[in-house]
Amino acid sequence: MTVDVSEELGAGAFLCHRCSKPAKLQCPKCQELKLAIKDSSFCSQDCFKAAWAEHKGVHKQATKDPWQYCTNKGLGRSAKEPVWNWTGQLRPTPIGPRRSVPDHIPKPEWAATGDAETERESRQQKSVPIWRGAQLEGIRAACRLAREVLDKAHAAVAPGVTTDEIDAVVHKATIDAGAYPSPLNYYNFPKSVCTSVNEVICHGIPDRRPLQDGDIVNVDVSVFYKGYHGDLNETYVVGDGVDEESKKLIKATSESLEKAIAAVKPGVRYRELGNIISQHIHANGFSVVKSYCGHGVGAHFHCAPNIPHYSHNKAVGIVREGQVFTIEPMVNAGAWQDTTWPDGWTAVTRDGTRSAQFEHTLYVTETGCEVLTARLPDSPPLWWQR
């Protein structure tokens, strides 16, 4: 039996899920599961009975996957919160539908399939490529564009703005330039940018939660432009109410990246970069995340080499002229350990403390490196640059 929710819904506020007539009844099981009203409304008991054989499948799916995390159908997170041991104050918020990319824009394979098989099977996962000439210029152009897009996202960060609105800024700026937002549908990631708020370390999914004065947010932009990827990120303060410890965390993370970049030159061991980062971070009383690392980037979104950010790591290999890779330390205010939300993407600090990250893409020169994603003269200032 359906339940009468005419006062709650309002007469004619929703249409019958079966016959599209004005609806004032709702499936009680859907109410219990907190599913979307528009998908559980019916005009009469007869319509509900007639639709039952098909409709009950919605309950089964919701019970199996309480987030209804179905990026293929654009449903995003449901209103029902899964039972999980949340580590901080953030909670999942519904996300908007996946944004479209015009047909004329060249796309990576995962745009259609959600899978990066060519990247995964590439020899570049084991052999670090050397970039020269036109290929290097292609990477350089993609990185310059990624910087310009990130600066537009930074300018949009403010209290009351949702991370989904930041996603819209990134998406539009990317496609307006004739590029594809690299994260979109990458292993089914549903959005065009990663936005990681407060205790989120990385891979946060843009959603409809408004940013609050005192939050911190990392925005990670990657673009696919004329066959090459550019990748960078920065962490920003939201409003004027950010506490001093969070500001210190952000600045120390940025400084650790700059110190590692200053050490990059041919002959340096990859593992040494983690030692440099950790020394600065530990001196400031913070910890370095061990689960994620920097990576090669170019014709593929992710490839060799891997660049761990923590000390005494076991990375094999040395920096060589012509290589392109990212360094992107993730730093926690508390312990280094992380865990992942049930959405399979959102990595958070295990103790609920805040986390910051900065990333640049580098090209190794004969004597050092070129920061391909360097800040521009008109880039919005970071908090200590104001």
Image (spheres, rainbow, N blue to C red):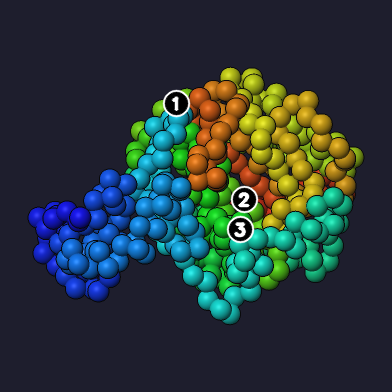
How many numbered marks, from 0 up? 3
Q: Which mark is residue 244?
A: 1
Q: Where is residue 71 shown, x and y percent of the image?
A: 49, 59
* Residue 227 vs residue 347, the one in the foreground: 347
Task: From the viewer's perspective, tell me whether residue 156 is left or right of residue 385.
Answer: left
- The CA distance from mark 1 to mark 2 is 25 Å
Q: Secondary structure at mark 3?
A: helix
Asked whether the viewer can see residue 112, the reply is yes
Mark 3 residue type: Tyr
Residue farthest along the bottom direction in this orientation: 104
Residue 186, numbered label: 3
Q: Is residue 246 visible?
A: no
Q: Which residue is mark 2?
A: 232
Instruction: Give the percent coordinates (x, y) of residue 231.
Output: 64, 54
Labels 3 and 1 touching (C-beta < 8 A): no
Q: Is residue 248 above or below residue 195?
A: above
From the viewer's side, name the closer residue of 38 and 347. 38
Q: Residue at x 24, y 73 (%)?
A: 20
| Residue 369 drawn above or below residue 311 | below
Residue 149 at what x, y percent from top left? 54, 59
Q: CA distance from mark 3 to mark 2?
A: 17 Å
